Amino acid sequence: MELIDWKSRLECCTYDAAVGIKIARLTGGSQFSTYLTSIDPGKSVNPHYHKIGDEHHHIIRGRGEIMLMDVESKKTTITRVNEYHSFVVHANTLHQLVNTGNEPLVLMFSCPENHLKSDRFVLERP
């Protein structure tokens, strides 16, 4: 068994400029891994999507809004999320999570490893 200290992993991880957050890998392999990130108040993940595979999200602490847009139909929804909420972002869905609270939004997510490498399509911020 491997015991993982989330806090220390998050404190020493590197900043991912493409999506605008620090991402700490907790466990997993190339097919499916689990990560942790913290989004500061008033900040957000840059809008992006993936063509292959889903992402499973779990809000550990904080609150925010998740914007989802189907890249083909352009249908868009915005949903408020809070700690203890979970949701799945399906392939070909543009997504952006915004911290609307006064404390860091701590998020655990699981996805194929390629979501952080070759299968990530980022939209530039206006």
Image: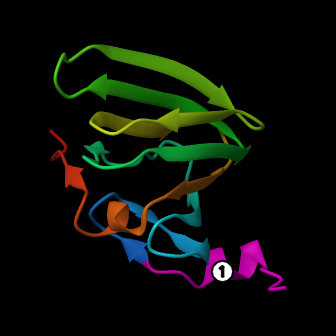
Above or below residue 45? Residue 93 is: above
State the residue position of label 1.
9
Where does the magenta region start and end? 1-14
The location of residue 94, given as percent across then percent down, is 29, 35
Query: What residue appears at the point 41 percent right and 74 percent down from the top-left corner?
Result: 15
Above or below residue 108? Residue 92 is: above
Question: In the visual, does 9 lie left or right of 67?
Answer: right
Q: Quadrant of the N terminus?
A: bottom right
Asked which quadrant contains residue 35, the reply is: bottom right
Query: What residue appears at the point 47 percent right and 38 percent down from the top-left corner?
Result: 98
The location of residue 54, given as percent across then percent down, is 44, 44
The location of residue 67, given as percent across then percent down, is 40, 27
Please check the rendered image and state whether residue 86 is part of the magenta-colored stretch, yes or no.
no
Question: In the visual, does 9 lie left or right of 94?
Answer: right
Asked which quadrant contains residue 6, the reply is: bottom right
Secondary element at tag 1: helix
Q: How is the image coloured?
A: rainbow
The location of residue 72, given as percent across then percent down, is 16, 23
Asked which quadrant contains residue 71, the reply is: top left
Observer-nearest of 13 and 117? 117
Observer-nearest of 76 and 45? 76
Can the viewer see residue 41 in this picture?
Answer: yes
Question: In the visual, does 102 lie left or right of 40?
Answer: right
Can the viewer see residue 99 in this picture?
Answer: no
Q: In which quarter of the image is the C terminus?
A: top left
Outermost residue, front side: 31
Above or below residue 108? Residue 75 is: above
Query: What residue appears at the point 33 percent right and 39 percent down from the top-left corner?
Result: 91
What's the amino acid at mark 1? Answer: Arg
Query: What residue appears at the point 38 percent right and 38 percent down from the top-left corner?
Result: 96
